Image: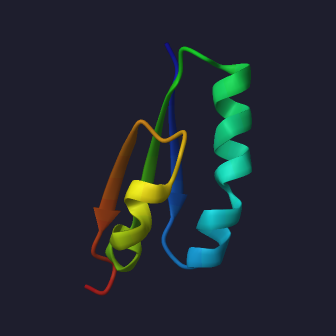
């Protein structure tokens, strides 16, 4: 099984538009585990991001 980590800490719009990429990864690597590392500012939209097996909000403000 592949573990794929995707990091997005700066732009919420980029994160939302990247859901097509997450879907493609799951189609190509169906046994993979997709993990997102996102800014804690985006934590409230995390439940609406499909295809991610795990979402980890990170405080990037210091």
The residue located at (51%, 57%) in the rendering is 7
The relative height of residue 50 versus residue 12 in the rendered view (above or below) is above
The relative height of residue 46 versus residue 32 in the rendered view (above or below) is below
Left or right of 33 in this view: 54: left
- Choose between 8 and 48: the one closer to the eye: 48
**Which x, y percent locates residue 9?**
48, 72
How many badges with numbers are in the image?
0
The relative height of residue 9 versus residue 37 in the rendered view (above or below) is below
- Choose between 33 and 7: the one closer to the eye: 33
The residue located at (41%, 36%) in the rendering is 53
The residue furthest bottom is: 61
The residue located at (56%, 76%) in the rendering is 12
Left or right of 18 in this view: 60: left
**Which x, y percent locates residue 61?**
31, 87
The relative height of residue 5 versus residue 56 in the rendered view (above or below) is above
**Which x, y percent locates residue 19?**
65, 52
- Residue 39 appears in which quarter of the rendering? bottom left
The residue located at (32%, 54%) in the rendering is 56
- Residue 59 appears in which quarter of the rendering? bottom left
């Amino acid at each position: 099984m592949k573990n794929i980590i995707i990091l997005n800490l700066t732009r919420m719009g980029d994160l939302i538009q990247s859901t097509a990429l997450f879907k493609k990864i799951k189609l190509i690597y169906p046994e993979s585990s997709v993990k997102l590392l996102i800014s804690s500012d985006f934590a409230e939209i995390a439940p609406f991001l499909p295809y991610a097996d795990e979402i980890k909000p990170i405080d990037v403000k210091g």
